[in-house]
Image: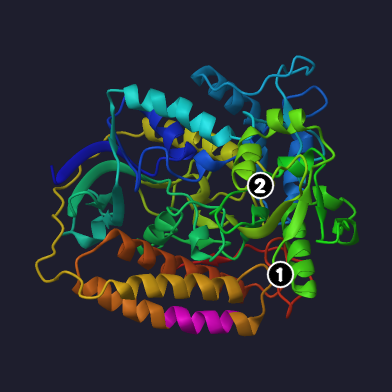
Amino acid sequence: MQHLYFDTLIIGTGLAGFTLALNLARTQKIGLITKQSFLDGASSRAQGGIAAALSKDDSSSKHIRDTLNAGAGLCNEATVNHVIENGPQAIEWLIEQGVSFTRDGNSDTGYHLTQEGGHGIRRVIHTGDATGKAVQQTLGEKIHQHPNITILEHHIAIDLITSDKLPHDSEHPTKRCLGAYVLDKKNDKVRTITAQNTILATGGASKVYLYTTNPDTATGDGIAMGWRAGCRVANMEFIQFHPTCLYHPHAKSFLISEAIRGEGGLLKLPNGKCFMSKHDDRAELASRDVVARAIDFEMKKRGLDCVYLDITHKPANFLKSHFPNIYSKCLELGIDISKQPIPVVPAAHYTCGGILTDKNGKTDLKNLYAIGETAHTGLHGANRLASNSLLECIVFAQAAAKDIINQSPISTPELPVWDESRVTNADEEVVISHNWDELRRFMWSYVGIVRTTKRLQRAQRRIELLREEIDEYYANFRVTSDLLELRNLVDTADLIVKSAKLRHESRGLHFSLDYPEISQQAKDTILER
């Protein structure tokens, strides 16, 4: 049981991983691994919905224009065109799988569409205010029932296995990915998994920050593993901070959907005054980077702990039907959103950069793919347009599946088992928790919504010290889930800081007080080992 073989190994069980598995499972044996339980992860938390040009008043060209505008000159136009033009097909695929989107008999599409920041029209199809949960549960049922899919819960990938670490293979001289070492968290055993193709679909890295809307699993695992294996990464400085995370001591990482502002919600100071019109003509419907910076500015200027999102002018029945999840969660915490404004703060939300891939999700390393938030495809540019991320997951997973299906099978060598003969059990695991806390705090303080060169330098020095401690710990003690996640977070934090130091301008999600102007020439930040 410590050595497993699959045609395709998918690391991550978000929408990208689920979509790929279902598109491959008719002809392949699939291994699907997840750090926690099957439906944990960021995809299940997505509230707003999926953007696609579905109504007669909309078009792909309009959706493309809004995406390019949000991306602040850094989007790959070919990628944008491909994803947006495949949007309606992706939604149709989900409907065929059984996803029940919210209906609207008065709409020409038959479905209710919402509008979010940066969109010029209502185009976000949804299932109430818990779209991700509905999609994941629907696809998850199909995956559970499929005989060709093996689900390994509570397993965390340690590192990719690459051919350059083995004796020379004259038949396949090009460096390639052969699988991964994976820790079974329940019995503390390391499994060797061999696969024809390996897919990184582990989500983003927002857990590198103190405040985030992301689940605890978002520790940049795929980005860090791909980087260590030799893949290039791009645009890691562009971390999207969601403007409205619920501010409450008992509400951990609870997102207040952008759709609330799309339905008329107003951002206000504690005295009840609106402020967004001072920062952007689009007011509450400005893109996320603008809204997050505006809230950050007002909070710092006035010494506030939070601002308020007010939707009390809408009837209670409207709020209960359109935002049942948000309504009930807030009520549970003593906030009636039909009568009281919601306290909110910005929080790290989405990693726009990642492992550099082509149009099929292929990385620099042969037989290794990256899809979803782990990847940098060029769709999001310097700032992701709201609700484009789930669409990207589907379109690129389908493209990767086609590419994998068209491959000819190749032989895979026998892989060595994990060697822990020279390590011992950790003596003081408190070191890990202390380092984790320190990392997230200085990343929030120095590499957050507004940056300076001096802050980035301070963060870089602290990362170097942490890495020394973690590398020593990793070399001498048996691996644990917490150690692996901390190792990945430090690698990811390093990539974010290095990328931010290279960008001498303010563009999209990267705002520097030392370089407040946008450069005339838009360039990606690409790091390679």
Is 463 one of the magenta-colored residues?
Answer: yes
In the image, is 72 to the left or to the right of 98?
right
Numbered range of the magenta stretch: 456-464
Indicate the quadrant where residue 510 lies: bottom right
The structure residue drawn at horizontal position 90% and vertical position 54%, both measured from the top left corner, is: 281
Residue count near mark 2 (Cα–Cα under 10 Å), binned few <14, some 14–19, many ≥20: many
Q: Which residue is mark 1?
A: 511
Q: Position of residue 3 (x, y in %)?
A: 15, 45
Quarter that holds the N terminus: top left
Q: Give the answer, above or below, for where 92 lies relative to 32.
A: above
Q: Main secondary structure of the magenta part?
A: helix
Q: Could you say whether the residue bearing mark 1 is in a helix, strand or loop?
A: loop
- Residue 141 locus on image (x, y percent): 40, 24
Q: Position of residue 299 (x, y in %)?
A: 75, 68
Reading the image, the residue beneath label 2 is 256
The reply to whether residue 519 is visible in this rendering is: no
Residue 55 in view here:
yes
Residue depicted at 62% across the width and 59% down the height: 347
The dot on residue 232 is none
Q: Which quadrant holds the C terminus?
A: bottom left
Q: Residue 68, how many percent across, how many down?
A: 74, 48
Q: Residue at x 62, y 69 (%)?
A: 448
Q: Is residue 433 left or right of residue 379?
A: left
**As drawn, 162 above or below 96:** below
Q: Is residue 106 above or below residue 24?
A: above
Q: State the residue in front, 187 or 513.
A: 187
Q: Are marks 2 and 1 in contact (CB under 8 Å)?
A: no
Q: Amino acid at mark 1?
A: Phe
Q: Residue furthest front?
A: 334
